[in-house]
Amino acid sequence: MSTSTRLNRAFLHAPLLPLSQRSRYILMSDCHRGIGTSSDNFLKNQHLYFAAMEHYYRQGFTYIELGDGDELWENRRIQNIMDIHSDVFRIFEQFHRQNRLYLLYGNHDIVKRKKRLQPLFSPLCFYEGIILTTGTPPDHTPRISLYLTHGHQASLLNSTLWPLSRFLVRYVWNPLENLGVLDPTSAAKNYHTKNKCESRLNRWAEENRRILIAGHTHRPTLPDNPAHYYNTGSCVHPRCITCIEIERMTMTLVKWSMATRTDSTLYVAREIISGPVSLYDSETVWKANPLSSHTPIQSAP
């Protein structure tokens, strides 16, 4: 099965969420929440994550996590992760109560596609893809649709052969990583693999004239010029987390990190890395593809 086939399948019956001038979405990816051990890469940035999430909750954003939220290759049970990072799931509950929470699965938490998240709040579905769309505007302006997925579909090992990759990570690469050896098959840790994966994602987006937003490679991408492929980055960078904000029909790549005031006190700062980029400037809005095979548009703020 090719990358194109896997990506097409991810969006075949993807739910649609409304996209308009009033829409506020925050896209994050690759939190890799673990069980609090030395291999829990989320631990070092959890304070940045909490600060960002509280900000986006207060500002009325809808949170969309583009996969690999929980590290379920190294760890067997999501309940153990929920126990350690209970504060995260309490924040999720607050978003969920207001219909402002949507979670996708990636390769490291692909088992979620057959399970539901419990018991902190009512069962929650996990998706392989979501489409943000303006639908068909009444003034006949071009439809704008953003295709969101994790991006592991660009790798055979991380999609079709994921059980093999999980075995290698759990029993081979994870122990070796504690000794300083990086996983050569990981798109986040191997530049050759990262470049190959991003090239395939970009090629699919260009050939299908889509606006594709993914994670997986951990490399934040939001060009100033109109493009087809964008990437949120991750929440496990050495000293920051990155994400993409969508507001007033523009996209902005931001990072959250620790900063120092003149009196030497520390605070969590939000910094724009790139953008805002207007969605109306993208040449991909020229093609109005039928969306009749998808789930009807759901309500969202």
Image: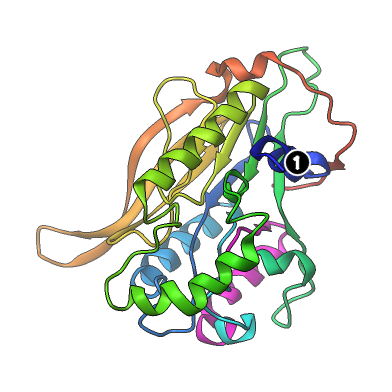
Q: Residue at x 78, y 22 (%)?
A: 289
Name the spot of residue 164 as percent of width and height, x first: 60, 67
Relative side of 209 to 143, left or right: left
Residue 253 counted in the magenta span:
no
Quadrant housing the N terminus: top right
Name the spot of residue 254 as percent of width and height, x first: 39, 45
Q: Residue at x 45, y 52 (%)?
A: 187
Span shown in magenta? 82-109
For this rendering, which residue is in front, 115 or 240?
115
Can you say whether 89 is above or below 220 in the image?
below
Q: Residue at x 50, y 59 (%)?
A: 30
User: Which residue type does callout 1 highlight?
Assistant: Phe
Relative side of 7 to 138, left or right: left
Tag 1, which secondary structure? helix
Can you say whether 241 is above or below 176 in the image?
above
User: Which class describes the residues within 10 Å of circle 1: few (<14), some (14-19), or many (20+)?
Assistant: many
For this rendering, which residue is in front, 208 or 276?
208
Asked whether the viewer can see residue 109, the reply is no
Residue placed under numbered mark 1 in the picture: 11
Residue pushed farthest left? 263
